[in-house]
Image (cartoon, helix red, strand yellow):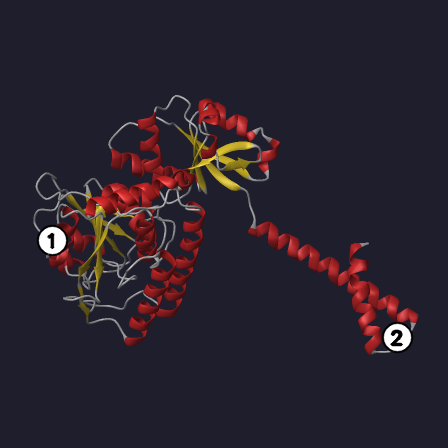
Amino acid sequence: MIPLLASAPFVWLTSLLIPLDPGSELALLIVFALIVMVARRRVSRLLGRLYRPERWLLVGEESTAELLRRSRGLRDHAVVAGTVAAHPNGSAPAHRLEALEAVDRYGADRVVIAGRDTDDHELLDLVRDFKSSGVPVSLFPRPLELLEAPAAIAGEVAGVPMIRVEALASRSALPYEGPDRRHDRHTHITVVVPAKNEGQNIGQVLSRLPKDLHEVILVDGRSQDDTVAVARRAYPRIRVLAQSGRGKGDALRLGFAAATGNLIVMLDADGSADPDEIPRFVAALEGGADFAKGSRFIEDGGSADITPTRQLGNRFLSETANVLHGTHFTDLCYGYNAFWTRCLPFISLDVPGFEVETLINLRIADAGMKIVEVPSYEADRISGQSNLNTFRDGFRVLRTIAAETRRRRTIHPERHPMADVAAHDTGAAAA
C-alpha cells in the first residue's frame, strides 16, 4: 500500500506533462511502485549496515555480563563482546597495555566498568587505563550512587542506568597553575617514535637522542625494510613494538600505553624533528606546564619543509580551532610535542591518521591543562617521501576540529557555579 501511495503523486505529475490513457496510468503506477519497493529495500539494507549495536567490553563479573546479555531491550543497542576482570595486577603501564589489548581483542566500541567490589582508587585507575585505549568509558552506578548522586546518571541505555565518564567533567575547564617542578620532580623521559619503512632515517635520529632518557619505544608499522634492525644497532636499549593496526594515531596509542616514564616525548622517525630540542620541551614541563606544544611559527621556530600551501592550510586550521575552542595555537598540526604521562586519560586516541596531533592538542586544551608553546625548527626529512597528503589529511584535521567541537559542547553543556567561584579566587590571588 505504501509504495502505491508514494507512487501516485509521480503518476499524477507525469499525466499533467504527457497525456496518458487509464491503462498507461495503471502500468506507470505499478512501475513506480516497484521502483519505490526496491529503493526502500536498498535503503533499509544500507541503514542496517551503517547502524550496528555497540560492542561493549565489560570490566567486572561474568554474572553481570550474563544479565546484560539476557536483556531484550539492550540487544538493539549493545552487545557484550567480552569480559575482563576488574582487579588487574602489575604496574600502571602494564595496566594500560592490558586495557589496549583487551579493547583490540574484542573490537570494543565502549568500555563499561561494573566492578561492584572496586573501591574508589581502583575505579579511578581502571578509568585511566581504559580511557588511554581510545574508546569511550562508562560506569554502572552502584546502588547508593543512584540515591546520592542522581545528577551523575547522564541517561539510560535501554533501561540500564549509565554514568558517562565525560559527564563527570561537566565543570568548565580552568587553566592549571602548577608549581615549578624542576627542584623536586624526578623526571623519567619516554620517547615514542612511530615508524614505517624509515630504515634510511631512523639510525641518524636515534643516534642524536640525549643520553639520560628513561626509555625509547619504537612502534613499527609493519615495515618492509630494515627499520627495526637499524634502530636496534643505533640504540641497543630500544623497545620495539609491532603495530597491529594502521596509521600514526594507532601507533602513538600503542606507544603511549607501553610507556613507563612519567614524561612522554613524541618524535618523528624521518629526521624532520631535531632530537636536540628535547631538553626545551622537558624544561617547559618541569617549569610548570602540563603539555609542551612544538611550534614552527613563533620566535626561534621555523621550517625548511613546509610549502606555502601547507602553511596557509595550517594557519586556517589553527585559527578555526582557536575560534571554536578558545585556544591560542600558532601551529596546530605540528607533531613534535611532550607531556606528563598523567595527561593520557584526557587524550584517549581514537583516530588513526595524521589528524592525531590535532586531536591531542584539542583534548588537552579542553581538559583545562596548562599548555606552553615551544619553538621548534622542522628540517627536511633525511630521505624518502612523506606519507602526508596535504588535502586529504587537511580535510581529516578539519573534520576532527568539528567533531571535537561537538564533543566539547556535549561534555561542557553549562558552566558549573563553582567554576565561577574558582575563577574569581584565582583572579583575586593574582591581583
Q: Quadrant of the N terminus?
A: bottom right
Indicate which disc, 1 or 2, sits on the residue closer to the N terminus.
Answer: 2
Figure quadrant of residue 258 = top left
Amino acid at pointer 1: Pro
Residue 176 visible at all:
no
The numbered dot on residue 279 is: 1
Frontmost residue, 179 versus 271: 179
Amino acid at pointer 2: Leu
Q: How busy is the neighbourhood of tag 1: few (under 14 within 10 Å), some, or many (20 plus)?
A: few
- Look at 19% across and 72% down and name the residue there: 304
Q: Is residue 332 left or right of residue 190?
A: right
Frontmost residue, 329 versus 333: 329
The vertical placement of 110 against 309, above or below, is: above
Q: Is residue 17 left or right of residue 109?
A: right
The vertical placement of 153 against 382, above or below, is: above
Q: Is residue 131 left or right of residue 10?
A: left
Q: Position of residue 203 (x, y in %)?
A: 15, 58
